[in-house]
Image (spheres, grey):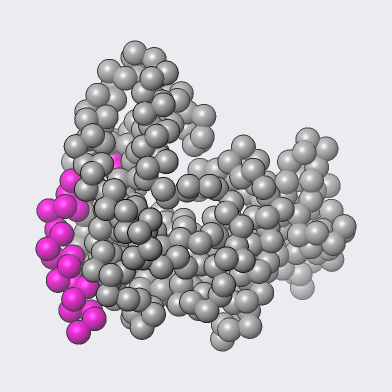
């Protein structure tokens, strides 16, 4: 089905001009739809990956619940994602191939970064994600459906990894030998966060759960505008949102960089991001949450590398890849970042202490 036909299944009152693919995401297929009427907005049209998200109506309902809630609280309404209903009245359209689509208003003069090229970008992202997290403090997380069960559950991800080891082909097992040993070496350290969650010592909150830098929208001057890509809104820990941002904002290289000498942790970006995030949200965090923020950063780098490795061992069935060893490159990249991050742990703890004092 043509994109224009899909676009016209929504109540947008605009005329389709062209659709341009946006290729930054790993999971969904996303297009920027330009309209021919200068008085009408442009739109983001997205096909949601049904192989990843098993209950897309629940996913869309999460988006509506949260964006409606935020619109009542946020001072700048235009910074909140606006979903457009379909002709049927639902906020999604199912095409003849049983693919699910949703439509959102595009925020003009905006863009994303794949890397934080300066501490300013890191701090702006921190303010944006910290404010998003803070505004959801009094949202009832129990209202959110779980769109991907066990998404950041390390026990579950390790179980998937162990299953993948039993069925992976020998060539991939040999090529991934060092990465597999890395998992075995560091898994017990990382499991502490999961144990604190399971014991109830860390509160479940409404969290974004995919706060990589490319899910923050910026204006042309590098100021934060909006948090985007709300597909993974679920009950979670602050450490997931804090940690996933650190993973992408505080790395000297993109996660696809194959030259590991180019991958290092950027403490100056960590200081800027943590200042922005905690400046917006520290008032709602308890001592246990704060004392484990650095662990949260390590945890999210580790679990992302683990997921890339598991997908590599499973012959790349989850993430989009551009070449045969793409997921292995991503794995090694994340583990190189984690090794370097661990050298800065004391400095990271001191930065957080200074921000809170």
Residue at 55 percent of width and 67 percent of height: 141
Q: Quarter-wise, where is residue 287 in the image?
A: bottom left
- Residue 302 colored in magenta in the image: no
- Residue 334 colored in magenta in the image: yes
Res 275 visible:
yes
Residue at 46 percent of width and 23 percent of height: 315
**Viewer-closest of 39 and 148:** 148
Quadrant of the rendering where the N terminus is positioned: top right
Q: Quarter-wise, where is residue 347 in the image?
A: bottom left
Highlighted magenta segment, given as a residue range: 333-357
Q: Is residue 16 left or right of residue 46?
A: right
Magenta: main secondary structure: helix
**Viewer-closest of 110 and 160:** 160
Residue at 28 percent of width and 70 percent of height: 288
Q: Position of residue 151 (x, y in %)?
A: 47, 48
Q: Quarter-wise, where is residue 58 in the image?
A: bottom right
75 versus 46 height, above or below: below
293 versus 301 height, above or below: below
Q: Residue furthest right?
A: 88
Q: Position of residue 314 (x, y in %)?
A: 45, 25
Q: Position of residue 268 (x, y in %)?
A: 21, 66
């Amino acid at each position: 089905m043509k994109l224009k036909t899909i676009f016209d299944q929504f109540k947008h009152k605009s005329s389709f001009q062209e659709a341009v693919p946006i290729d930054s995401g790993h999971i969904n297929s996303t297009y920027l739809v330009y309209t021919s009427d200068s008085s009408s907005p442009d739109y983001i049209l997205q096909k949601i990956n049904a192989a990843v998200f098993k209950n897309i109506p629940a996913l869309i309902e999460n988006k509506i619940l949260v964006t409606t809630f935020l619109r009542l609280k946020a001072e700048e309404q235009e910074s909140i994602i606006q979903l457009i209903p379909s002709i049927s009245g639902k906020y999604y359209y199912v095409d003849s191939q049983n693919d699910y689509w949703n439509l959102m208003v595009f925020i003009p003069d905006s863009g994303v970064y794949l890397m934080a090229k300066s501490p300013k970008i890191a701090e702006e992202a921190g303010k944006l994600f910290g404010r998003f997290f803070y505004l959801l403090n009094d949202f009832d997380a129990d209202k959110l459906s779980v769109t991907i069960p066990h998404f950041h559950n390390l026990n579950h991800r390790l179980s998937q990894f162990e299953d993948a080891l039993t069925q992976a082909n020998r060539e991939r097992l040999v090529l991934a030998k060092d990465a597999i040993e890395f998992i075995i070496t560091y898994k017990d350290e990382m499991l502490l966060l999961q144990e604190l969650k399971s014991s109830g010592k860390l509160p479940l909150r409404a969290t974004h759960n995919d706060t990589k830098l490319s899910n923050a929208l910026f204006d042309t001057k590098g100021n934060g505008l909006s948090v985007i890509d709300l597909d993974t809104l679920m009950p979670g820990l602050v450490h997931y949102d804090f940690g996933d941002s650190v993973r992408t904002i505080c790395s000297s290289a993109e996660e696809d960089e194959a030259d590991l000498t180019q991958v290092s942790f950027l403490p100056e970006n960590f200081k800027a991001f943590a200042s922005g995030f905690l400046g917006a949200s520290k008032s709602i965090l308890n001592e246990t949450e704060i004392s484990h923020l650095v662990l949260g950063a390590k945890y999210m780098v580790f679990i992302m590398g683990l997921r890339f490795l598991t997908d590599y061992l499973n012959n790349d069935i989850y993430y989009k890849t551009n070449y045969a060893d793409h997921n292995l490159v991503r794995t090694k990249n994340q583990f190189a970042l984690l090794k370097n991050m661990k050298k800065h742990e004391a400095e990271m703890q001191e930065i957080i202490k200074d921000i809170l004092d």
